[in-house]
Amino acid sequence: MNNIFYGKLIFELSREGRVGYQLPEPVADGKGISESLPAALVRDEAEPLCLPQADEQTVARHYTNMSNNNFGVDTGFYPFGSCTMKYNPKINEEVAALPAFATLHPAQPEATVQGALQLYWEEQRMLSEVAGLSEFTLNPYAGAHGELTGLMTIRAYHRSRGDEKRTKIIVPDSAHGTNPASAAVCGLQIVEVKSTERGTVDLEALKPLLGDDIAGMMMTNPNTLGIFETEIPEIARLVHECGGLMYYDGANLNPMLGVCRPGDMGFDVMHINLHKTFSTPHGGGGPGDGPVGVRKGLEQFLPDPHVVRREDGTFALECRDGSLGSVSTFLGNYGIIVRAYAYLLALGRDGLAQAGPLSVLNANYIKDQLKSHYLLPIDGLCKHEFVFDGLRPEYGGDHHDDSHVTTLDVAKRLLDLGFHAPTIYFPLLFHEALMIEPTETESKDTLDSFIAAMKQIAEEAKSDPQSVKAAPHHTPVRRLDDVKAVKDAIFTYQG
Ligand SMILES: *Cc1c(COP(=O)(O)O)cnc(C)c1O
């Protein structure tokens, strides 16, 4: 970015000569360098910096106003399906900000970081227990990165046995887009398996795909429709029988917490999203962490380095023979790991066991309250989330033309009523998908007010569809051209 861009465009609140700092006047001495100001702070006037010039108060108001124009978990309900936008206790932030964690240097001698290594070691033990697996690495940076690491682990396992021909991976058609993407990055060929009417993996469609070229199968459970995959034991038996390994996409582990464990269902490798299930604020591509767990016998393939506890009780970083190598710098996003640790300890075994059932209860409550107004293509018990296919026909939902209210219109109108929109037009299995995940942290009051807003919108869709189509009416900006907004962003304040 050039100076003109910074100085003139980004900050038109800039006024020549205004400053928000106080420095001692430079004193010219014989050598031309100030005595009262460190030399590093004295700039050569021949090279002026074109930075915005503003007083502290203008800057404070600018950023505060900008933050007020945003919607976040701390401003309102955020039922964004597949993303688990739950409330994250602020104590986790305070713990992660403790100087002992926040000022660690990755190259510090082992003896000076014993506590940090112990935290990592204990957390990987805790996650192993939650998942029913043998060992975890916390090194991958995100869910998709965890998938890649897990798939590399599966490849390392096959190669260690001289089994080079397993180059295919089975992925259900309902999978999150990152599954086929990670598999492709890992050099695997994707074989898609269909879903049944109920939205679960079709066992009969799976059988003909199995063979000695299959590295494994990726499954998401609950799947992207929020449905528990009931055929897992049989699927795991079949995949293992053909020599493949079972991969569990555990990005949305909330509803399983304390209820059941992937390791007990026959899965060999999995990832978890700390930034969804284990309480790290996320969204907008913020930092995350995607730990990968494996069953007994696969530990040696996990990435380097990993943390071990020595016999004398001290902790050390180690690399292993057979490891797939390093997937991140040092130990991943350590601040995220600290937040998850604080969350795990605060909830404990009993608290975690409540989180799962509560996330399921909340989702089913909303689903049952709203299915009179919105079309529910797959009925029955859901887990932490579910999908509507737009408004019911009585509310104009079956007309796919410009005069009727679509899922996009419902999402925009929700913003007027103080709620973030659910995930829309995903999964791709339906035309007007509206994917709602309330999470376990919301009160019944909040769920009830969301239900009331959704019903109000359905009524408006019938009585005054044009008004809904013109929504939002009360937000700082109205409907944006999403593509243009990305390609031709306007950075000026215009407040
Ligand atoms: C969020 C999600 C992912 C990807 O996680 P990222 O951290 O965004 O890379 C993968 N699978 C499922 C089912 C998810 O919901």
Image: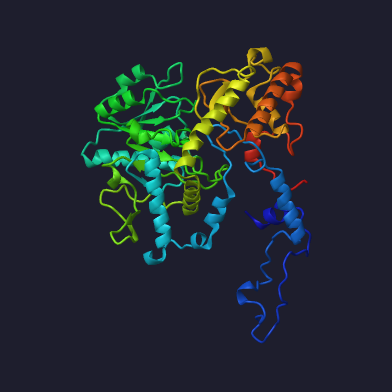
The reply, left or right, for residue 279 in relation to residue 454 is left
The reply, left or right, for residue 39 in relation to residue 464 is left
Q: Residue at x 46, y 18 (%)?
A: 198
Q: Quadrant of residue 308?
A: bottom left
Q: Quadrant of residue 453?
A: top right
Q: Position of residue 416 (x, y in %)?
A: 73, 32
- Considering only vertical position in the picture, is 303 above or below 266? below
Q: Position of residue 254 (x, y in %)?
A: 48, 36
Q: Quadrant of residue 175?
A: top left
The reply, left or right, for residue 473 in relation to residue 108 is right
Q: Residue at x 78, y 62 (%)?
A: 16
Q: Nearer the viewer, residue 492 or 215?
A: 215
Q: Nearer the viewer, residue 324 or 122?
A: 122
- Whether residue 241 is visible, yes or no, is yes
Q: Position of residue 27 (x, y in %)?
A: 71, 81
- Considering only vertical position in the picture, is 463 above or below 471? above
| Residue at the farthest left position | 162
Q: How is the image coloured?
A: rainbow
